Amino acid sequence: MRRPQKAWAWIPSLYFAEGIPFVVVMSVSVIMYKRLGISNAEIAFYTSWLYLPWVIKPIWSPIVDILRTRRYWIIAMQLLIGAGLAGVALTLPGDNFFRYSLAVFWLIAFSSATHDIAADGFYIVALTEHQQAWFVGIRSTFYRIAMITGQGLLIMVAGYLEGATGRIDLAWSMVFYLLAAMFVLLSAYHFRFLPQTQGDIAGHPGSLVDIVAAVRETFVSFFKKKHVASILVFLLLYRFAEAQLGKMTAPFLLDDRDVGGLGLTTMNVGFAYGTVGLLMLTMGGILGGFAAAKHGLKHWLWWMVAAINLPNAVYIVLAFVQPEELMLINIAVGFETFGYGFGFTAYMLFMIHVARGPHSTAHFAICTGFMALGMMLPGMFSGWAQEVLGYQSFFVWVLICTIPSFLVARVISLGADFGRHS
């Protein structure tokens, strides 16, 4: 039996490191570009394209299994991500920053997607099934803490630096240099504390034909899984509403009140996500993991579907009322993030359940690829939809878009068998 206390030394930091580049690419970039004067439609469209590395990562996931160990890939990708973050910092003060920073974000996105393959595979081979279920709440929580750190603490730092330096581009450049240094330290930490485990064994690299054959075998075996059609529909539509909401919440909070936003400062937005949001998300994620470990996913599925979708309605209230009290805004953000933390546990457990068996690392990567596609496609048109509808009608539309999530949960609950610790 693997000792749980040793897992505590690397699971929180590993999933924090997995979450940071993702939130930087997909969320922090949105706030940064908004502050630098890019339109909502351009922001949503181009940053949604950055999901593509996570969509297609199953294509090269078998290579991660074959070449080197998962531990090696984790440490190497963290160093490469650090270099990419420094590259973004270099581009921001110059001309054509939008074009050049997007190019570097692509490098970070591909490095982060590869890191995800290795980290998720390492989680599966290094822990027993019961430990996987027990730690899924911790794993999800620290991943989301990374997201709140990006949307909260980093945004607050950027807001402070905007005021201190008087230059938005310089302030954000300094934030990205800070992130780059953090990833160098994370790489060093995991070099020291990430365990060498018997299950983490590199394959035997052969010819290109062998690698292509391995990729083909991986995909064929995945699409031969029982209920594969239901699995794919669930992965694509469970977060259909969240994919659109997530792109427009920060612009909504930042936009002026005369165009339907709440007119918050950069620091206000960071505070809203980094205080009440962090606390409530942590509670939701841990509670979801512990609940699922005790009674199983099938018991909690409908509660989790409701939790991840129905709290989206708070943004309808915010858009119509446009409150000026920061406390009310913080409470609304906290309510939504608690629901997300609890509800996303179902999604993570479902992917782990689907990935178990031969090729677990690559199959989990395929699941997360479809997850990314489910976020990428709705996110691409969310900015356009918001500009056409306005914030009030857009958030009503988002609530309507929660219906597919309930429908696919119904399909899964009828067609799949979730064990107690699934």
Image (cartoon, helix red, strand yellow):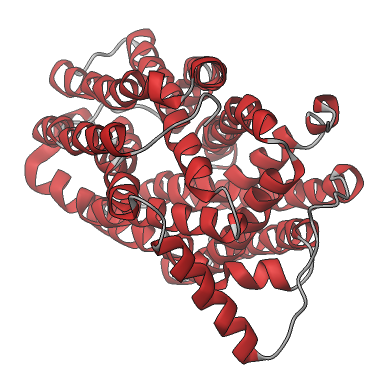
Q: In this view, does 298 lie to the left or right of 271?
A: left
Q: How many marks?
A: 0
Residue 208 quadrant = bottom right
Considering only vertical position in the picture, is 18 above or below 108?
Answer: above
Task: Please give the name of the residue rendered at 69% of the width and 29% of the height, measured from the top-left corner.
Answer: 131
Q: Please state if 391 lies on the left or on the right of 145 as rendered.
A: left
Which of the 4 image quarters holds residue 260?
Answer: top left
* Residue occupying image coordinates x 71% and y 61%: 77
Horizontal and vertical percent position of residue 90 = 62, 64
Is 344 drawn above or below residue 300 in the view shown? below
| Image quadrant occupied by the N terminus | top right
Residue 38 in view of the camera:
no
Determine whether, in the image, residue 376 is placed left or right of residue 354.
left
Tell me where residue 141 appears, x and y as whole percent: 58, 27
Residue 390 lies, with reference to residue 93, above or below; the image says: above
Q: Residue 176, how many percent across, how many down? A: 63, 51
Q: Residue at x 44, y 45 (%)?
A: 27
Give the residue displayed 43% in from the left and 18% down from the top.
Answer: 338
**Observer-nearest of 401 and 206:** 206
Of residues 103 and 337, the one drawn nearer to the viewer in this rendering: 337
Residue 10 shows in this picture: yes
Residue sitting nearer the eye, 276 or 290: 290
Q: Where is residue 414 in the image (x, y as percent from the top left)?
A: 26, 33
